[in-house]
Amino acid sequence: MNKTIVLGNEGIKALKNSLLAINTQLENTIDACEREIAEYGANALSELAPISAKYDGNYSGSVSFNPTENGYEVSYEGEQVAYIEFGTGITGEGYYPDSDILNQANWRYDINDHGLGGWVYKDHRTGEEFHSVGMVGEKPVYRAYRKTEQELPNIVKRVLNEKFN
């Protein structure tokens, strides 16, 4: 961008006003980029995350996309979404390193290498006990993050073209 500056008070005032306008346009462009990136991430997460227990038998979760003081926040929330993201462990792998977490969640991990014998956990809502031989984590949050990261340059390029052309 080239700008001709006329010397004197009027030229300096014009330059100042021009810089303020460019700064405002830049701030609006950054906000638009942040919003588009967060919206893309929320859509990717909605596609990848099980959000209905009726659909696949997992506990349900919900995806949300909200503005915050410093940008936007995408979240995947629900009572059991950590198990969907990280899994429940695979049987026969021995001692889980942090037994306090297991005690708080009422889990009895396969510390005795029961293999297919698995372990039992108690649903904290109903008190009902369930048997598990492990569930591999689906990693919907991580996969949505990676998908968004790959699309990031295209999103920024598209927003810049919209704002500056």
Image: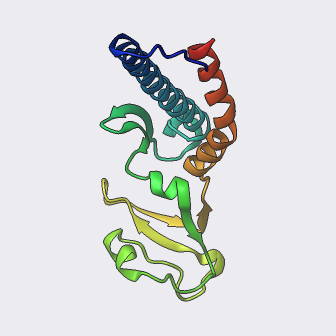
Residue drawn at x 30%, y 53% is 125
Q: Could you tell me residue 54's position as x and y percent? A: 52, 35
Which residue is found at the position 57% from the left and 74% from the top? Answer: 118
Name the colour scheme. rainbow
Front residue of this view, candidates 22 and 108: 22
Residue 37 percent coordinates (x, y): 54, 32
Relative horizontal placement of residue 93, taking residue 61 as reference (left or right): right
* Residue name at image x 43 percent, y 37 percent: 62
Please state the horizontal and vertical placement of residue 6, each as a whole percent of the image. Answer: 47, 13
**Left or right of 121 on screen, residue 110:** right
Return the residue found at the far bottom: 112
Foreground residue among 46 and 109: 46
Q: Residue at x 54, y 80 (%)?
A: 110
Q: Is residue 131 left or right of residue 11?
A: right
Q: Nearer the viewer, residue 39 or 123?
A: 39
Q: Is residue 144 above or below residue 6?
A: below
Question: Quarter of the image containing the N terminus?
Answer: top right
14 w.r.t. 141: above or below:
above
**Quarter holding the C terminus?**
top right
Query: Against 108, is 94 above or below?
Result: below
Q: Position of residue 162 (x, y in %)?
A: 60, 14
Question: Which quarter of the figure has residue 16?
Answer: top left
State left or right for residue 134 relative to residue 79. right
Residue 56 falls in image quadrant: top right
Given residues 111 and 37, the one toward you in this image is 37
Total numbered badges shown on the rendered structure: 0
